[in-house]
Image (cartoon, grey):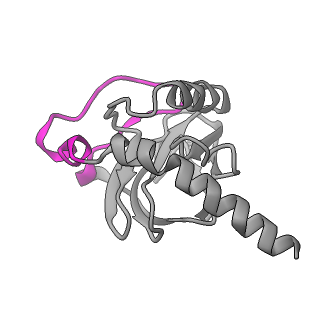
Amino acid sequence: MVSKIHSAILAAALTVFAVPVLSHGDARHEKKDSRPISTEENSFGREGDPKKATRSISVDMSDQMRFSPAQITVRQGETIRFRVKNSGKVMHEMVLGTMEELRQHAEMMRKHPGMEHDEPYMAHVAPGKTQTMVWQFTRPGEFYYGCLVPGHFEAGMLGKVTVMKGTSK
């Protein structure tokens, strides 16, 4: 009985958010390869050079509002090629940041669901599609990734990146 109620609530929530999710779009987000690599340093690292990626990590996003894997460990200095797949039927995204940055961005997305943005630490992935995001983790600590489509972050669509002190090989 409880699972039927949860399923009904999830279905209703997905229906409510379908219009904002579709307006979020992905057309502008597919052009990352055509621009130069950003040198901007963030609290959680910087855009990585795909030619210098030290390893690839596949991340799956589902309509159960979960990432798989939900926890990733990397070494300071390591450049990761994330292969981000949306196995669901609605738009999902993977956005890297600190917990505070993700919370603030999620709040902004609730207020402005159609907002266009395209940063190197974001992958907006249409249902059934895969995108690549390359990131270099330059500082040790705990960082996070979340889906900031309205309602998804609040439903628990969040993962954690632990960056171990020391440089990668």
Image quarter of residue 69: bottom right
Identify the residue at image location x=45%, y=60%. 90
User: In x, y percent, where is residue 43?
Assistant: 53, 25
Q: Is residue 129 magenta?
A: no
**Is residue 100 found left or right of 24 in the rendered image?**
right
Identify the residue at image location x=35%, y=49%. 134
Quadrant where the N terminus sits is bottom right
**Is residue 73 found left or right of 137 in the rendered image?**
right
Report the front residue among 117 and 10: 10
Dominant SS type (magenta): loop
Identify the residue at image location x=41%, y=24%. 41
Q: Residue furthest left?
A: 34
Magenta-tinted stretch? 27-51
User: In x, y percent, where is residue 145?
Assistant: 57, 45
User: In x, y percent, where is residue 10?
Assistant: 67, 60
**Is residue 4 found left or right of 163 in the rendered image?**
right
Identify the residue at image location x=28%, y=48%. 26
Report the front residue among 59 and 47: 59
Image quarter of residue 140: top right
**Is residue 122 found left or right of 63 in the rendered image?**
left
In this picture, is 32 found above or below 127?
A: above
